[in-house]
Image (tube, grey):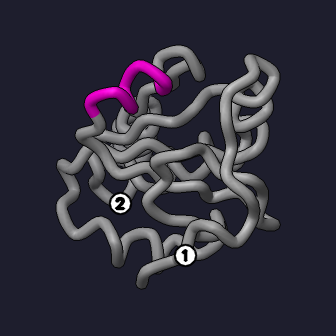
Amino acid sequence: FRGNNVNDKNMISKEIDSFTSISSVELDLMLDNKDFTLIDIHTPEQRHIPGTDYFIPFNDIDAIVSVLPNKDEKVVLYCRSGGMSKILANQLIGRGYSNIIELENGLNEWTEEGRETLPEGSITTQI
């Protein structure tokens, strides 16, 4: 029994580590030919990256899952610094999602590099 638990934990760890982290430069390039859902998950609400599809607070995983019925859909998550997006990426991978990407240094890096943002309240949560 003990060995089974160890194996199960090892399997979960491998799955949890299977999301991708990208830089703001990479996200900016991806937005040119957008083929993904972009979700701002920072709590409280902040300014948003143009092209953001949803603002859904990071602690409302059920709402996030409700807008992502296809577990193979490409999804990019971002928050202010990357911490919340990494946590949520792990949770989504744990729920069977297979194509999760997170913005490694979040909106901080995006704005530090002089990229445009949209004001708070400009993205509506459509759930």
Amino acid at dot 1? Thr
Q: Is residue 44 left or right of residue 97?
A: right
Question: Residue 1 lies in magenta, yes or no?
Answer: no
Mark in front: 2 vs 1 = 1
Quadrant including the C terminus? bottom left
Q: Is residue 56 left or right of residue 116?
A: left
Residue 106 coordinates in the image, percent (x, y): 69, 35
Residue at 60% x, 40% y: name it: 86
Residue at 37% x, 26% y: name it: 30
What residue did someone put label 1 on? 124
Q: Main secondary structure of the magenta part?
A: helix
Q: Camera-side residue: 50 or 89? A: 50
Give the Cα separation between the discs numbered 2 and 1.
25 Å
Whether residue 6 can be seen here: no
Q: Is residue 64 above or below residue 93?
A: below
The disc placed on residue 76 is none
What residue did someone put label 2 on? 95
Q: Which residues are magenta?
A: 27-33
Q: How many marks?
A: 2
Q: Secondary structure at mark 1?
A: loop
Residue 43 coordinates in the image, percent (x, y): 77, 64
Q: Crowding near pointer 1: few (<14 within 10 Å), some, many (20+)?
A: few
Amino acid at dot 2? Arg
